Image (spheres, rainbow, N blue to C red):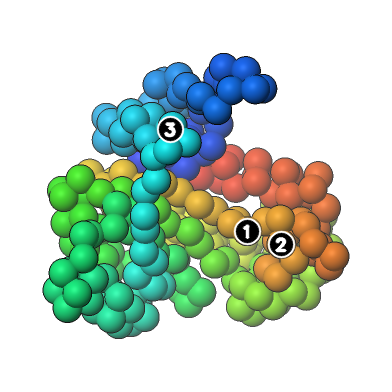
Amino acid sequence: SMHRVWIVICLSVAAATIAVASLNSTEHKFEEELCNPRATRAAQQTFKMLAKYSQPESILSGQNIGQTGYDLDRSFRQCWTMLQTDRGLPTPAVMSLDIGPDEVPFNVTPIANVLEEHIKRGGLVTISMHPRNPWTGGDYNDNFQGSFAELVTYGTPANRRWRAWLADTAYFLKALQRRGIPVLWRPLHEANGDWFWYCAGGENAKISPTQFKRLWRDMVHSFQQD
């Protein structure tokens, strides 16, 4: 069954209200209140931290440390550790990683340890996912598209594959929540391109903008269900 995922600023950050002073002004003001009333304390604190850096002159640097699994360990050692030790550079503010494209890991502890250490140093963590093609079971860049109606119809083969991925992802995020690790969640990223099966932009868009919105809402609903 699905796990309730309240940790992730996820859709809270994306949906938070941003008041723009005027069209001719570069000043942006965040209303420091999340749209999700059940947001954890860690999520609220993280959002307030982001509000401090909302001015155009503020820049947060980041580094992707790889995909969950072996690639994460290898990339972390090659990229992040090199920045800290070999070159003595300042630690990037944002640590980024990807879920997939292989199965979502259920042994979250090694990954959580890395993320927790970064959080304790005052950093931010962002995570994206590379969901498998729900029609074929192929990789995330397998651009074959079946019926969109099948994808969003409960109980069909494509829908079962899609919801199984979301259920595993929710388990992963929930485990991070129990460790007190707030996450800037980036699902269905680069949607304005045309290289993933869920892309809704570019010359060879796989789905329409309307379908993408439907898929997004379906994803949110799935995360919120038991």
- For mark 3, what is the residue? 54
- For mark 1, what is the residue? 190
Q: Is the Cβ of the residue at disc 1 closer than 8 Å to that at disc 3?
A: no
Instruction: Give the residue displayed 51% in from the left and 74% down from the top.
Output: 101
**Disc number placed over residue 193 in the picture, else none:** 2
Q: Quadrant of residue 6?
A: top left
**Image x and y of residue 188, in percent:** 60, 56
Decide: is 171 above or below 78. Answer: above
**Element under label 3?**
loop
* Foreground disc of the pair 1, 3: 3
**Element under label 2?**
loop
**Image x and y of residue 90, in percent:** 21, 60
Q: Quadrant of residue 78?
A: bottom left
| Foreground pick, 198 / 152 | 198
C-alpha span from label 1 to label 3 = 22 Å
Instruction: Give the residue displayed 41% in from the left and 20% down from the top.
Output: 33
Count residues near mark 2 (Cα–Cα under 10 Å), then give few for <14, some for 14-19, many for 20+: some
Q: Is the Cβ of the residue at disc 1 closer than 8 Å to that at disc 2?
A: yes
**Element under label 1?**
loop
Residue kind at label 2, given as amino acid type: Gly
Residue kind at label 3, given as amino acid type: Ser
**Image x and y of residue 200, in percent:** 76, 56
**Image x and y of residue 217, in percent:** 65, 41
Count residues near mark 3 (Cα–Cα under 10 Å), then give few for <14, some for 14-19, many for 20+: some
Instruction: Give the residue displayed 72% in from the left and 43% down from the top.
Output: 213
Going by the image, does 41 lie left or right of 85?
right
| Foreground pick, 47 / 22 | 22
Q: Earlier in the sequence, mark 1 or mark 3?
A: 3
Whether residue 220 is visible, yes or no, is yes
Going by the image, does 141 lie left or right of 178?
right
C-alpha span from label 3 to label 2 = 26 Å
* Foreground disc of the pair 3, 2: 3
